[in-house]
Image: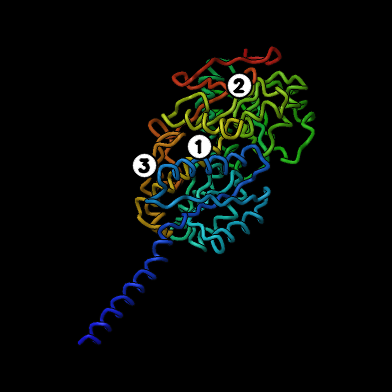
Amino acid sequence: MKEISHSKRRATLLASVLAGALALPLAAQAADPIKIGVIAETSAISGVAIPNGAKLAAEEINKAGGINGRMIEIVEYDDHNSAADAVRAFQRAGNQDKVVAVIASYISEVVLALQPWSARMKLPMITPGAASDVITQRVHDDYANQKYVFHGYLASTQIADAVCEAGKDILVTQMKVKSAVVMSEDAAWTVPLDEEYLKCLSSIGIKVVDHIRLSPDTTDFTPIFNKIEGLKPDVIVTGISHVGVQPTVQWQQQQVPMAMFGVSSQASSSTFWKDTNGAAEGVVFNMVSAPDVASTPKTIPFAQAYEKKYGITPGYAGYTAYDDVYMYADAIKRAGSTEPDKIVAAMEKTDWVGTIGRIQFLGQDSKFTHGMKIGPGFVSGLMVQWQAGKTVTVWPSDAATGKLRFPANIKLGN
């Protein structure tokens, strides 16, 4: 009987040891970080804001306890402005680094190259800054495969409409503008942008006298500005992102008498003033959030925290990348899982107040499937102007922190 009792004790002890041993990997697994990959162009003004914004969000979430006790780890990849490098980074992120989701790029060509890989690898991806309409169109047309992709910024058509909405008030009513030249860089995102510009500018009473698409490799903009001056439009409506510093500097040096109004992505960070040596004075550009406007209660605190940490204000994609990390964290928490299909299902139910507004994603019935809802109560546009080294929101009137002010050489409408 004593031998049996001893054997039972040994068996009980062995079972206890085995149970403890089995529990160790499970506990370790529970404590493993949740990895989110960030693929961006860190040499670009707009690109570097993406990992910066993402890391700031992760730090805040981790400080508050993470996702059910698991910390978020941001795994960074620099794609060097190359779609091929971005694809390699995406493959590594999913296959080797075991990220559960990706935030990728402000360049449409890069995101469009990653989209098929997101489908093949079933790896959720959101872009904080690319704008091509094709991104959401693909999700709409092939939902079963493309459902892993979300659009964390406005589509090009939506951006053009936002610019025209502001233009009706600023250009037509305030500046008495009657004619414009559309000047955009030759890129995937500007194809639908320009198409919509030509329609919506006409609809608000502005005649487009020329449509110029310039190579992003352009270094001398003098012939372009000479041509524009010869046409004598009242304003230049822009669609520039990969370029920005050079045309702005030469616009000022040449004392072009037409205001630049529209999209200028590089202008959205405070480094732009220094990079252009103040030539940015008077440039008016579209954003969905700005450091001087409380689009939501989160906007200004984020901008201040970003500037304190990095010494500059966030480029436009910094706001969205920050929001994207929070939305992923919220989706994973609600899903109770990092399985891709469960993350996607939870992301589709997102109702998140971020720095740029209240964010909900459009469904399969919209041509912008997995794009954000825009308009009152959701995400809407601002127009911001460079004035004496600072960005000042000038539209809409209920959000404006200042009034339009142009250099003396700028000719306003008749």
Q: Which of marks 2 and 3 is nearer the N terminus?
A: 3
Q: Is residue 58 left or right of residue 110?
A: left
As drawn, the label of residue 158 is: 1
Q: Which residue is drawn at 45% across and 52% down?
A: 140
Asked whether 190 or 341 is in front, the reply is: 341
Q: In this view, does 71 lie to the left or right of 175?
A: left
Check the image and name the residue furthest to the front. 2
Contact, mark 2 vs mark 3 (Cβ under 8 Å):
no
Quadrant into which the N terminus falls = bottom left
Q: Which amino acid does label 2 sit on?
A: Lys
Q: What residue type is labelled 1?
A: Gln
For label 3, the residue is 351
Task: Please state which of the two labelled residues, at mark 2 or mark 1, is closer to the viewer.
Answer: 2
Q: Residue at x 67, y 15 (%)?
A: 407
Provide the secondary structure element on which disc 2 rests: strand
Q: In this view, does 221 lie to the left or right of 185?
A: right
Q: Dividing the picture into quarters, in which one does residue 361 lie?
A: top left
Coordinates of residue 244 in the picture (x, y in percent): 68, 33
Q: What residue type is labelled 3?
A: Asp
Q: Real-space Cα distance between discs 2 and 3?
A: 33 Å
For label 2, the residue is 390
Contact, mark 1 vs mark 3 (Cβ under 8 Å):
no
Vertical order, 388 against 101 (above or below): above
Work out whether residue 182 can be spotted.
Answer: yes
Q: Real-space Cα distance between discs 1 and 3?
A: 20 Å
Q: Which of marks 2 and 1 is nearer the N terminus?
A: 1
Vertical order, 31 against 134 (above or below): below
Vertical order, 176 against 299 (above or below): above
Coordinates of residue 273 in the picture (x, y in percent): 67, 26
Coordinates of residue 279 in the picture (x, y in percent): 71, 23
As drawn, the label of residue 307 is: none
Q: Residues within 10 Å of mark 3 (few under 14, many from 20)?
A: some
